[in-house]
């Protein structure tokens, strides 16, 4: 381990001890050896997760009061982390053995990049491959370099592929605990994108498990996401990280994303329309549809 920087692997978990064990086993099989694993239990009703963690010598287990989502457990892990780098994963995903080694090498050789991310192969509840890759765009360059303007409101970092310098997180702050589960990761990565360049690794080094309990299916989280991304945009504009022209273009994009929630909850859209300055250029066209949708429901 001499000369190897320490990596802190952060795993939020809740009441899935069997899947957690598989996730930990995959991490322990890494070809890179200098890492610590921080498992943060979000108030599971039993102590099964702690029992799962005991045999793994590199695992540190913490239990907090239930917060209802992964943001607080991840933030707890960040606070406890001692590594130069942070790697995040969920308690149901699996890493291929060379993931950490390849990602450490990338950031060690590319000091102007602060984050590595990639794509995933999909597995089902039983762990069987589905011949499907997620997180990969037709043009990989879209996810590489200065992605702040290309990313906002369009795509996000796949959480179990993420690998970031602790120094970047120290600058952008924690995950937003006030957001509903499912959108808080997109808001966090958006903030990171205005702070550092992203290195896209077009090689699936993670098996991403798709099943009925995925938090990413939370509709409320995604419904409110444009409002939180708007706050990020306002902040970076105030910090003079982007020009007025860029601000207006991105604001317009978020306005379109905002009204795309039309069918989900038109009343919610009407209550929050004033948030977007750029929204007024399409307001007249959409108000008719909003009113029609509301009338159909009542």
Image (cartoon, rainbow, N blue to C red):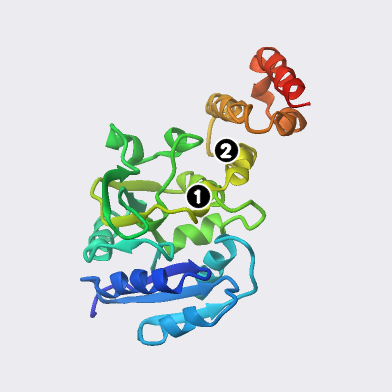
Quadrant where the image shows the N terminus: bottom left
**Disc 2 and disc 1: Cα gap in Å?**
32 Å
Taking 268 as reference, is 55 left or right? left
Q: Is residue 290 above or below residue 48?
A: above
> Which quadrant of the view contains residue 248?
top right
Question: Residue 264: horizontal and vertical position, in percent?
Answer: 63, 33
Would residue 108 be seen by someone viewing this image from the given angle?
Answer: yes
Secondary structure of residue under mark 2: loop
Question: Residue 213: horizontal and vertical position, in percent?
Answer: 50, 56
Between 189 and 40, which is closer to the camera in this rendering? 40
Question: Residue 165: horizontal and vertical position, in percent?
Answer: 40, 61
Earlier sequence position, callout 2 versus callout 1: 1
Taking 270 as reference, is 257 left or right? left
Q: Is residue 22 above or below residue 253?
A: below
Residue occupying the point 64% across, 65% down: 67
What residue does disc 1 label? 216
Residue occupying the point 24% across, 71% down: 32
Between 25 and 57, which is closer to the camera in this rendering? 25
Quadrant where the image shows the C terminus: top right
What residue does disc 2 label? 240
Residue occupying the point 46% across, 57% down: 168
């Amino acid at each position: 381990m001499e000369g190897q920087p320490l990596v802190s692997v952060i795993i939020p978990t809740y009441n899935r001890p069997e899947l957690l064990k598989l996730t930990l086993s995959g991490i322990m099989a890494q070809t890179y050896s200098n890492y610590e694993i921080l498992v943060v239990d979000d108030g599971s009703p039993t102590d099964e997760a702690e029992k799962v963690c005991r045999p793994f010598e590199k695992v540190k287990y913490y239990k907090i009061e239930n917060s209802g989502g992964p943001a607080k457990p991840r933030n707890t892990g960040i606070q406890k982390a001692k590594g130069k780098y942070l790697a995040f994963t969920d308690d149901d995903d699996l890493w291929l053995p060379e993931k950490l080694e390849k990602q450490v090498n990338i950031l060690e050789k590319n000091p102007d990049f602060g984050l590595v991310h990639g794509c995933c192969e999909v597995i089902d509840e039983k762990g069987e491959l589905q011949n499907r890759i997620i997180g990969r765009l037709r043009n990989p360059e879209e996810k590489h370099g200065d992605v702040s303007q290309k990313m906002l409101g369009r795509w996000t970092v796949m959480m179990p592929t993420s690998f970031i310098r602790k120094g970047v997180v120290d600058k952008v702050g924690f995950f937003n605990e006030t957001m509903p589960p499912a959108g808080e990761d997109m808001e966090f990565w958006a903030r990171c994108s205005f702070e550092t360049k992203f290195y896209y690794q077009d090689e699936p080094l993670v098996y991403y498990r798709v099943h009925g309990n995925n938090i990413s299916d939370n509709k409320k989280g995604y419904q409110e996401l444009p409002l939180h991304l708007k706050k990020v945009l306002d902040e970076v504009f105030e910090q003079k990280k982007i020009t007025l022209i860029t601000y207006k273009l991105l604001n317009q994009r978020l306005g379109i994303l905002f009204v795309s929630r039309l069918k989900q909850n038109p009343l919610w859209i009407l209550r929050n329309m004033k948030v977007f300055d750029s929204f007024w250029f399409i307001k007249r066209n959409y108000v008719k549809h909003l009113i029609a949708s509301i009338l159909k429901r009542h």
